Image (cartoon, rainbow, N blue to C red):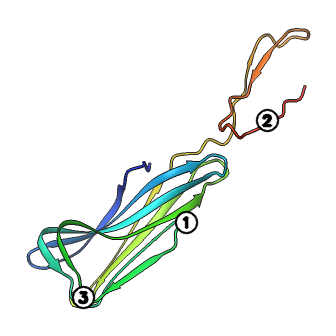
Amino acid sequence: MLTKNYKLLKEIYVGDTGDQDIYLRVYAKYNSQSSVNNTSSVSYQSRLYVSTGSFYSGNTTQKSLSGTGAISKIKEAANGTYSAGETVLNTITGTILHDPNGKKTISTSATFYSSPWGWNATVNGSETLPTIPRASKPTINGLLQFGSTITINTNRVDESFTHTIKY
């Protein structure tokens, strides 16, 4: 399940330069949720991991990233040098409408292409979002008998929710 911190969803081995191993990774996190609109704001990142030293990708490098509810992003660069560890390639954010029951699974995809190395790697990942409560759960206190006094608590999921109780 996604949290408010970036979570690694998946990685794929891109290639070996002879000195380094290169991996493409996708991450996601949720920024906020709206119970009124039944939506979540989600950010996605693609990152390149270099095992040691630095890696020169050469000319004609392309990095793309897409994710549920977000506009895809493609970056092309004449060249790129990546140091050991992770480098963020792209970041995108989108608003996702949950299913009527408040549940939702997001998916993301990233591509890294380097012409000189002949690498064209794509990684896909998915994860569930925290469920947004969609229904209030009323409780009744008292005896359900004619003439008895009872109390009905609606336990609203959101302060803006309204309820009609008929008797």
Q: In screen coordinates, is 81 left or right of 125?
A: left
Instruction: Write down the residue under mark 2.
Output: 163
In the rendered structure, find residue 118 and report the number of the disc placed on it: 3
- Which of the two residues, 121 or 163, is positioned nearer the viewer here? 163
Local secondary structure at mark 3? loop
What percent of the width, then of the height, locates residue 137? 69, 31
Q: Residue at x 90, y 25 (%)?
A: 167
- Three-letter code for the amino acid on which mark 2 is drawn: His
Q: Residue at x 81, y 14 (%)?
A: 150
What percent of the width, then of the height, locates residue 29? 42, 55
Instruction: Write down the residue under mark 1.
Output: 69
Local secondary structure at mark 1? loop
Vertical position of residue 120 compared to residue 32: above or below: below
Q: In screen coordinates, is 150 left or right of 94?
A: right
- Three-letter code for the amino acid on which mark 3 is drawn: Gly
- Three-letter code for the amino acid on which mark 1 is drawn: Gly
Disc nearest the viewer among 3 and 1 = 1
Mark 3 is surrounded, within 10 Å at the Cα level, by few (under 14), some (14 to 19) or many (20 or more) other residues, namely few
Q: CA distance from mark 3 to mark 1?
A: 31 Å
| Callout 2 touching callout 3 (CB < 8 Å) | no
Q: In screen coordinates, is 148 left or right of 113?
A: right
> Quick one: which residue is furthest to the front in this view?
160
In the rendered structure, find residue 48 and report the number of the disc placed on it: none
Vertical position of residue 14 compared to residue 113: above or below: above
- Which of the two residues, 106 or 3, is positioned nearer the viewer here? 3
Q: Which image quarter: residue 124?
A: bottom left
